[in-house]
Image (cartoon, helix red, strand yellow):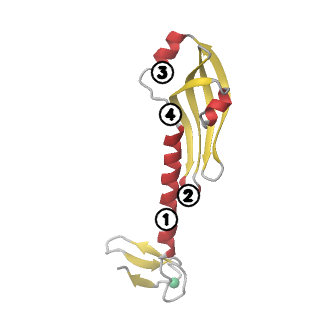
Amino acid sequence: MSEDKRFEALGSDADTIVVIATSESMESPSNHYESWSEDIVFTTKGKSFRATINCSLHVYSGFEASLDAKKEITTAEYRRLAAGHEPEDVPAIRKRVKERASADAAASAAEAVRPNCPKCSKKMKVRTGNFPAFWGCSNYPKCDGTREKR
Ligand SMILES: [Zn+2]
């Protein structure tokens, strides 16, 4: 049994979901949150449908989907719309979330190694420009503390 919430939103007996378009994608990678809507075609009990579903993905609560609109179409129309599109599966979505989560873990690790300013003790930021990269105080221009970046 599929764990894809899209199947649940459509009724659990849908047997194929083909995503033909995705729109209004909204992302917040730092919080692992995404929401988007999918234009899909699917079959169930020998009938074909076209539908729009709203999806959201949050790393802590998982993948949710709800059905927005559904219209029965002919088998010929289904084949024409589905041609050239792969059905999207749950493992692909999970993999994307996992990659996001590990990118975020790497970002917080990088945050942890930021040194403190020798003058005011605030965290320092990497500064670049016409110089080799160096640490500059995050309180610049109020504080001009710097450190060499190894
Ligand atoms: Zn400082």
Q: Write down the quadrant of residue 43 in the picture.
A: top right
Disc 4 from disc 3: Cα separation:
12 Å
Query: In the image, what residue type sits under mark 4?
Result: Glu
Q: Position of residue 24 (x, y in %)?
A: 57, 38
Using the image as rendered, state which of residue 22 and residue 134 is in the foreground: 22
Name the N-terminal-most of marks 2 and 4. 2
Secondary structure of residue under mark 3: helix
Name the N-terminal-most of marks 4 and 1. 4
List the residue tagged with mark 4. 88
Of circles 2 and 4, the one toward us is 4
Q: Are marks 1 and 2 in contact (CB under 8 Å)?
A: yes
Disc 3 from disc 2: Cα separation:
34 Å
List the residue tagged with mark 1. 107
Query: In the image, what residue type sits under mark 3?
Result: Ala
Q: Residues within 10 Å of mark 1 (few under 14, many from 20)?
A: few
Using the image as rendered, state which of residue 135 and residue 67 is in the foreground: 67
Q: Residue at x 66, y 31 (%)?
A: 8
Q: Which mark is residue 30?
A: 2
Q: Which mark is residue 82?
A: 3
